[in-house]
Every structure is written in C-alpha cells, then in structure tokens.
Amino acid sequence: MDAPHSRGRVFRAALVAVVPGALIGWTVYRRVVPAVGELTDSAPGADAAPDILVARIGELERALAARDREISRLETGAVRAWDATVPGLEARIEALQAENVGLADALDHARDELESQSNEVEHLRRAVTLRDRRRADEGKESR
C-alpha cells in the first residue's frame, strides 16, 4: 500500500471514531462505503463519505449543543427555584421547631398542673369522705 492511500483510510476511520456513540457514525459510514478495509482513493463514494460524516458530525454537535443549552436552562431554573424556595422553608422549619419546643414545654407544664390538681382533688375527696363518715358517726351517737 502506498502512503497517501493509507492516510486516506486512517483519516476516514478517525472521522468515525470522533462521532459520540460511534454506532451512528459507523452506520452512516457503512452505507456509503461497505467496509473500511476496502476503501481506496478511487473507490466510488470514497470522496463523499468524509463529507457525509462531516455533515453528520456537525448535526450531532449541533444537537448536543442544543441539549447542553436545554440542560443549562433547566439547571438554572432549578437553582433559582431552590434559592427562592428553600431559604423560606428552612426558616419556617426553624420557626416550627422552636414553636414545637415551646408547645412541648407548655404541655409538660399542663401535665404537671393536671397531676397536681388531680392530687388535690383526690385529697379533697378523701377529706370529704372522712368528714361525712365522722358526721355519720356523730349522728349515730347522738341518736
């Protein structure tokens, strides 16, 4: 093989390797030229293959750039939404946690009060019961 001929093959193979996910580029390449090993500078369609691949690579690069712009737009929107929403939510969470602590303390105080009042009520019941028994006993004795 002569040098220019082998450079042509290397060049064409390099174009296929540049395509992301090389299957798309390879499929296009194989439609134009059935087998890379059979390429020659005088093969029919050999000059058209690089042009088709260059065009396909351009299409893929434009599609990739469009997707990158869309991802960037979505990321920017997500960051803005995060920045607008999360600090307020974090402040609300902190306020609710503080309120929860206050309410838990108030509940503990109310339970203590309830227990104290319950003990007082029980003490008064016993005192009334005892008083009533004494009165009943005094009433029996006075009869």
Image (spheres, helix red, strand yellow):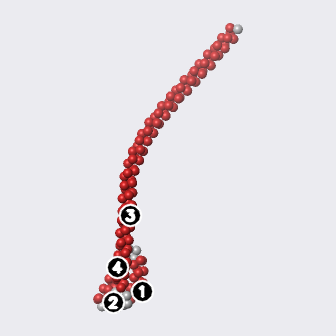
Q: Nearer the viewer, mark 1 or mark 3?
A: 3
Q: Label 3 vs label 2: CA separation? A: 42 Å
Q: Earlier in the sequence, mark 1 or mark 2?
A: 1
Q: Which residue is mark 4?
A: 54
Q: Which residue is mark 1?
A: 34
Q: Label 3 vs label 4: CA separation? A: 25 Å
Amino acid at dot 2: Asp
Q: CB under 8 Å between callouts 3 and 4?
A: no
Secondary element at image label 2: loop
Amino acid at dot 1: Pro
Q: Label 1 vs label 2: CA separation? A: 14 Å
Q: Which residue is mark 2?
A: 41
Q: Label 4 vs label 1: CA separation? A: 18 Å
Q: Nearer the viewer, mark 2 or mark 4?
A: 4
Q: CB under 8 Å between callouts 4 and 1?
A: no
Q: Earlier in the sequence, mark 2 or mark 4?
A: 2
74 and 33: which one is in front? 74
User: With respect to residue 128, does 49 lie above or below?
Assistant: below
Residue 129: x and y, percent?
Answer: 62, 19
Q: Nearer the viewer, mark 3 or mark 2?
A: 3
